[in-house]
Image (tube, rainbow, N blue to C red):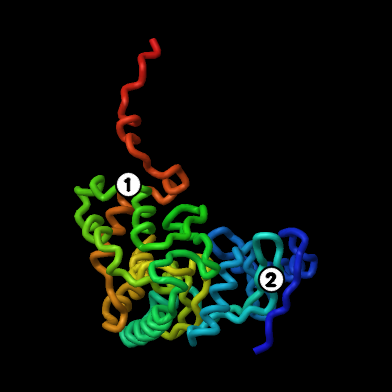
């Protein structure tokens, strides 16, 4: 396969030829040309996609997975690098409309999709981390996951440290009313670290007639506890994804983590994702917050 063309930019400003192609895509795909959670994905002519302002981790993860697995990933044609980020031009994957391609699945297609997804997950789980217990990015640096706000976090050198971060530093004694959290976080050494996509849902798994055509959006990917891909599937759960969850739960080759999912649900109830932007918990925080303010009268 031909290597992608690499261009170095002095800033994140788009080169004129890429701006023109984005404009042309808007004309050709009027009303159907913009996507992505931050509106930074554009359809171009000739079945190309431009994804702007990507963290280098996304390309690194895609290249790593392409090299070590057979998971279908869009081909990268052009890389425009600038300090701290990249604009990527890649192949447009077939499929994609959630209501059509997931909502319209037949029972047989649900089964086929489950088998395809199991194969992808098992390949990711077979990849070996750089060190036992390491939680972080491929480059051994920080990670990003909107489950944990919009800022980068880590890396961590043990699952126990990662669990402490999930609790925002609070000791397990503070979670005695959440037995699922206590049960899971009391045994961090039981969990292997595996390579995870960390955002597997119908928006990022392109399907057509029940077959996976591509897995996209690898910016969150990295080394996480083995249950992370499964529990993250339920982050932002919605009824439109019913066939996706049916395929996951009915496919025996997909390892389920119900206790870990319950623990995550308990944490999600108590901790807004953007609370991770605040300083971590420290002893006496609750007492200080509960102190009566002095009378201003």
> x, y percentage for residue 248?
32, 76
Q: Nearer the viewer, residue 205 or 133?
A: 133
Number of numbered discs: 2
> x, y percentage for residue 20?
77, 68
Res 269 label: none
Residue 198 in sight in this render:
yes
> x, y percentage for residue 239?
34, 65
Category of crowding for the residue at label 1, using alpha-carbon neighbours closer than 10 angstroms: few (below 14), some (14–19), many (at least 20)? some
**At numbered mark 1, what does the secondary structure look like: helix, strand or loop?**
loop
Which image quadrant is residue 18 in? bottom right
**At numbered mark 2, what does the secondary structure look like: helix, strand or loop?**
helix
Q: Which residue is mark 1?
A: 170
CB under 8 Å between callouts 2 and 1? no
Q: Nearer the viewer, residue 142 or 89?
A: 142
Q: What's the residue at 46%, 52% (across, down)? A: 149
Q: Quadrant of the C terminus?
A: top left
Q: Quadrant of the N terminus?
A: bottom right
Q: Which residue is mark 2?
A: 25
Q: Please give left or right for residue 204 compared with residue 104 in the image.
A: right
Q: What's the residue at 71%, 59% (across, down)? A: 12
Q: Please give left or right for residue 12 compared with residue 226 in the image.
A: right
């Amino acid at each position: 396969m031909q290597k992608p063309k690499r261009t170095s930019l002095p800033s994140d400003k788009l080169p004129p030829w890429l701006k023109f192609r984005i404009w042309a895509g808007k004309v050709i795909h009027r009303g159907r040309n913009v996507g992505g959670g931050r509106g930074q994905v554009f359809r171009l002519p000739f079945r190309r996609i431009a994804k702007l302002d990507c963290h280098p981790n996304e390309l690194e993860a895609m290249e790593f997975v392409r090299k070590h697995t057979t998971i279908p990933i869009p081909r990268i044609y052009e890389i425009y690098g600038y300090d701290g980020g990249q604009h990527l031009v890649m192949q447009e994957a077939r499929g994609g409309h959630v209501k059509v391609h997931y909502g319209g699945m037949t029972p047989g297609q649900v089964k086929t999709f489950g088998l395809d997804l199991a194969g992808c997950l098992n390949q990711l789980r077979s990849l070996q981390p750089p060190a036992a217990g390491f939680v972080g990015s491929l480059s051994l640096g920080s990670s990003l996951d909107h489950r944990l706000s919009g800022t980068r976090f880590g890396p961590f050198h043990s699952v126990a440290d990662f669990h402490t971060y999930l609790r925002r530093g609070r000791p397990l004694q503070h979670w005695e009313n959440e037995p699922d959290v206590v049960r899971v976080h009391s045994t961090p050494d039981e969990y292997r670290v595996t390579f995870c996509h960390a955002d597997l849902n119908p928006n990022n798994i392109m399907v057509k007639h029940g077959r996976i055509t591509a897995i996209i959006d690898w910016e969150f990917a990295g080394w996480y506890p083995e249950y992370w891909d499964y529990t993250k599937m339920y982050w932002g759960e919605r009824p439109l994804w019913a066939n996706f969850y049916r395929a996951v739960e009915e496919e025996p080759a997909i390892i389920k983590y119900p206790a870990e999912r319950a623990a995550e649900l308990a944490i999600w109830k108590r901790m807004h994702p953007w609370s991770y932007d605040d300083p971590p918990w420290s002893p006496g925080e609750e007492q200080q917050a509960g102190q009566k303010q002095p009378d201003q009268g």
